[in-house]
Structure formats: C-alpha cells, structure tokens
Amino acid sequence: MGRGRAKAKQTKVARDLKYRSIDTDLTALERELRGGPDEAPEEVEDDPYADLVERYADLADG
C-alpha cells in the first residue's frame, strides 16, 4: 500500500522537469565543470608519509 502515491509523486516531478522552461546559466556551469581558479587544489608542502615511501620503496619493486 502507498505505491500509488509514490508513483504519482514521481510522475508529477518528471512531468514538471520535462515541461518547465529553465533559464540555465551556461557560463556558470562551464566554470563549475572546468574548476575555476578559486578551486585550485591545495599543495602539500610536507608529506607525512614521505619517509615511509623511501623506507619501503625497494619492496614495491617486487
């Protein structure tokens, strides 16, 4: 019980998305997808695992 109400809600949402005219800011979307300059990854100055990488490097070669 209750499946009809959930299906009706899904149908309503799908119909609303299909027929609603939405003004999309394509430049903002492009900026978000490209990753603007304000989203530059942080550089790690001191790697806490650098000593372990050096210690176990010969084991990684096999």
Image (cartoon, grey):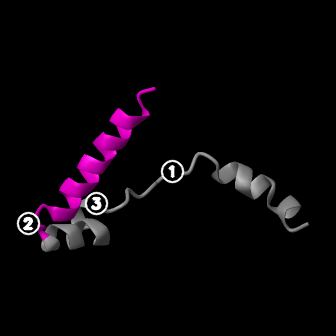
Q: Does any portion of residue 27 appear in the rendered image? A: yes
* Residue closest to the far right: 62
- The foreground one among 60 and 3 is 3
Residue at 22%, 73% (x, y): give it. Answer: 30
Q: Does any portion of residue 35 appear in the rendered image? A: no
- The foreground one among 37 and 44 is 37
Q: Main secondary structure of the magenta part?
A: helix
Q: Is residue 51 magenta?
A: no
Residue 37, placed above or below residue 17:
below
Where does the image place residue 18, in percent across and percent down from the top left?
22, 63
N-term-proximal mark, 1 vs 2: 2
Which numbered circle lies on residue 46? Answer: 1
Q: Amino acid at mark 2?
A: Asp
* Residue closest to the far top: 1
Relative horizontal placement of residue 2, taking residue 30 as reference (left or right):
right
Where does the image place residue 17, in percent across and percent down from the top left?
21, 58
Q: Nearer the viewer, mark 1 or mark 3?
A: 3
Residue identified by numbered label 3: 39
Q: Is residue 7 magenta?
A: yes
Q: Which residues are magenta?
A: 1-25
Residue identified by numbered label 2: 23
